[in-house]
């Protein structure tokens, strides 16, 4: 389900415009967003003083305003997006790193907010990227070094990150084209594995990814980081297992599941397109509901004592085999 924060934001922006007409300017309104959001959630009405402070920030700062206190509402908003509850409530998510932000800009992803630490952001391209977003009136803040260190989850922080709006494609608007290849994932526990699967899906030419149920979160910071920017170019569809099976049947899409108990080796099957590969949990595999309703269940042969492999590895093996057969069949 795609979250929509517009009904929440509009009354808050209107309140600021009432107390300070200058905030009709988009840049001022954007800079006030974090404070308005916090005050609204805590039952407070935006004050004239708060509006005036935001006005002064824009009039006297040609750079993003600096945040130094851990209880600043803008910093608290950033922290909340590192939790599933915060992402679910707002429909937003957080990214970190120059490469991720550059890919987001390249793919025209909906960037809502930028945060940076000038003492860490030494890369010239990253500095240029941040400057370009500021010139495009994308709102943001500069964090003190200590706050940035408290926030970042990166092993090698680059001093730059952003808040983006989640993008989900409604199932009703998802149509399968001739010869298309899809992916569906169910209950992938590891965000890192999920991100790697998304990255692999892009490389294999997957049309879109179905996120089955509520256990998987492609916007978890770990998944975003592991996707290496592939998340921004993928069509994501959230639906139940039952809705997915109904969609596949109505669109005449062949469903292929992977399981160690599969009766056929994955290379022995001649895949019929359009097709969708269904990947399940690393620990327990696919649910019985899916295993009983898919068209084919294949297995990856293994040697030695190993009886299973990582879900991301399995996805890569199977997706590239399916992609290879798709190319051959199209000749």
Image (cartoon, rainbow, N blue to C red):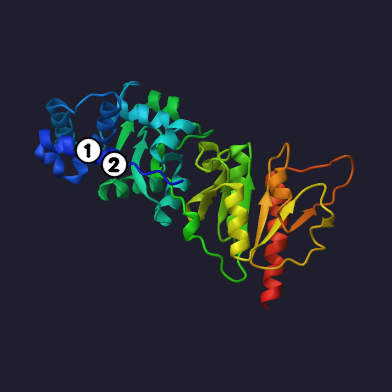
- Residue 207, given in percent of the width and then of the height, sits at 56, 61
In the image, 132: left or right of 156? left
Q: Contact, CB < 8 Å: mark 2 with mark 1?
A: yes
Q: Secondary structure at mark 1?
A: helix
Q: Tell me the quarter of the image containing the C terminus.
A: bottom right
- Residue 92, given in percent of the width and then of the height, sits at 40, 40
In the image, 95: left or right of 292? left
Q: Residues within 10 Å of mark 2 (few under 14, many from 20)?
A: few
Which of the 4 quarters of the picture holds residue 53? top left
In the image, 191: left or right of 113? right
Q: Residues within 10 Å of mark 1 (few under 14, many from 20)?
A: few
Query: Front-most of 202 and 271?
Result: 271
- Residue, disc 1: 11
In the image, 199: left or right of 121? right
The residue sitting at 29% across, 23% down in the picture is 42
Residue located farthest toward the bottom when viewing the structure as drawn: 331
Camera sees residue 197 = no
Query: Front-most of 217 and 142?
Result: 217
Which of the 4 quarters of the picture holds residue 49? top left
- Residue, disc 2: 7
Q: Secondary structure at mark 2?
A: helix
- Residue 163, given in percent of the width and then of the height, sits at 39, 40
């Amino acid at each position: 389900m795609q979250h929509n924060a517009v009904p929440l934001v509009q009354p808050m922006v209107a309140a600021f415009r009432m107390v300070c007409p200058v905030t009709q300017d988009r840049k001022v309104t954007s800079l006030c967003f974090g404070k308005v959001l916090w005050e609204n959630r805590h039952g407070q009405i935006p004050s004239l003083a708060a509006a005036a402070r935001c006005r002064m920030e824009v009039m006297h700062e040609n750079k993003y305003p600096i945040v130094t206190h851990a209880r600043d509402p803008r910093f608290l908003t950033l922290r909340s997006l590192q939790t599933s509850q915060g992402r679910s409530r707002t429909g937003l998510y957080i990214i970190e790193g120059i490469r991720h932000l550059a890919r987001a800009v390249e793919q025209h992803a909906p960037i809502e907010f930028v945060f940076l630490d000038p003492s860490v952001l030494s890369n010239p391209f990253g500095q240029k990227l941040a400057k370009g977003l500021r010139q495009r009136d994308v709102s943001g803040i500069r964090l003190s070094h200590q706050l940035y260190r408290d926030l970042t989850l990166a092993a090698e922080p680059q001093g730059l990150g952003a808040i983006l709006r989640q993008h989900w494609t409604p199932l009703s608007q998802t149509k399968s084209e001739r010869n298309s290849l899809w992916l569906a994932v169910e209950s992938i526990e590891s965000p890192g594995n999920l991100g790697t699967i998304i990255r692999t899906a892009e490389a294999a030419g997957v049309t879109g990814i179905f996120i089955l149920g509520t256990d998987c979160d492609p916007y978890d910071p770990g998944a975003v980081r592991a996707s290496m920017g592939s998340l921004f170019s993928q069509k994501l569809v959230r639906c139940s297992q039952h809705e997915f099976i109904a969609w596949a049947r109505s669109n005449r899409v062949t469903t292929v599941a992977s399981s160690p108990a599969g009766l056929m080796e994955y290379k022995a099957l001649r895949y019929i397109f359009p097709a969708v590969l269904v990947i399940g949990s690393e620990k327990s595999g696919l649910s019985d509901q899916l295993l009983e309703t898919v068209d084919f269940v294949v297995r990856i042969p293994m040697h030695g004592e190993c009886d299973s492999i990582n879900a991301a590895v399995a996805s890569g093996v199977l997706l590239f085999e399916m992609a290879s057969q798709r190319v051959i069949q199209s000749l």
